[in-house]
Amino acid sequence: MVREYDHLQEKGIRFITPLDREYPKRLLHIYDYPMGLYVKGDLPDEECPTAAIIGARNCTEYGRQAAEFMGRELAKAGVQIVSGLALGINGAGHEGALKGKGKTYGVLGCGVNICYPRSNYYLYEAIPSQGGLLSEFGPDEEPLARNFPMRNRIISGLSDVILIMEARKKSGSLITASLGLEQGKEIFALPGRITDALSEGCNELIQSGAGILTSPEDVLDYMGIFHEKRCINREKDEKGLAKIEKMVYSCLDSEPRYLEQIMVQTGLSAGRCMSALLELELEGFAVRTSGQNYMKTIT
């Protein structure tokens, strides 16, 4: 047993139990709290406000941008970000927190020495230096499907508020929201169009009484954190953009628009449209989602 413990330390992993002083106090108040946690990096600060950012793996570009934006702005304000290091919304929330120079913590459904999914390897490597990775599953435990619903209670348990960015009607994010409600946590949901399947879960939560997430200030106000009022969307006219760039920008939306749609709306040639879109991309006002589809950035 001592040898196994030494092997953990060699890998930069430590094991804590509810008997240890550093075991998260928030978890002691939830049903079926884990009897042990494997940790790489740090554990969340008990005194700092903490928000979970969760949602669909196969999210839209709008949902991904919104999650990153929320993570970044909340982290800047001193809020710790907790999520599950999954594809889509989870990874974007972590990425935003890292960009905001804040603390972020990933709760894994496998051993902390395993990066899953592999496409989030850069997050897996970066998070321990700006927060930590934790799991109740032992090293080398594979990411089995049954593990993920179990880890959700830890994500909600570590958080003061839970932000649902995008979710289908039946999804793991709604399970986490339900667990959070049972634990007495505040739920915020990003509203979406009634025709969007990935917004059905969020809209349903709002209908049931969840807070409407329109900006980071909604969360900061709830937490009692002082902040400067700021607008999510930039007023481009004040940025000194050229006339053609303004015309092209006015055609963009929070949903991707195809190049030909923009050409029809502006009456511009493909070359002039592409030139203006490239300039908007370089200045951070637009993003290309795939092929020749473009949308506004959330700033």
Image (spheres, rainbow, N blue to C red):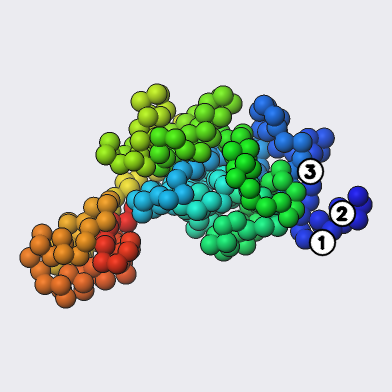
Is 6 on the left or on the right of 173, as rendered? right
| N-term mark: 1 or 2 | 2
| N-term mark: 1 or 3 | 1
The image's mark for residue 16 is 3
Q: Which residue is mark 2?
A: 4
Residue drawn at (60%, 49%), measured in percent from left and top? 106
Q: Residue furthest bottom?
A: 271
Q: Give the residue type at disc 1.
A: Glu
Q: How far from the left and from the top, in percent, is residue 248?
A: 17, 62
Q: Give the residue type at disc 2.
A: Glu
Residue drawn at (48%, 45%), measured in percent from left and top? 74
Residue at mark 1 to residue at mark 3: CA–CA distance = 16 Å
The image's mark for residue 23 is none
Is 49 or 162 nearer to us in this picture? 162
Q: How far from the left and from the top, in percent, is residue 13?
A: 76, 54
Secondary structure of the residue carrying tag 1 is helix
Is 90 on the left or on the right of 41, as rendered? left
Rate crowding at label 1 as few (under 14), some (14 to 19) or many (20 or more) other CA atoms within 10 Å: few
Q: Residue furthest left?
A: 267
Q: Give the residue type at disc 3.
A: Ile
Rate crowding at label 3 as few (under 14), some (14 to 19) or many (20 or more) other CA atoms within 10 Å: some
Q: Which residue is mark 1?
A: 10
Q: How far from the left and from the top, in percent, is residue 177?
A: 50, 32
Residue drawn at (87%, 54%), measured in percent from left and top? 4
Q: Quadrant of residue 211?
A: top left
Q: How far from the left and from the top, in percent, is residue 214?
A: 35, 39
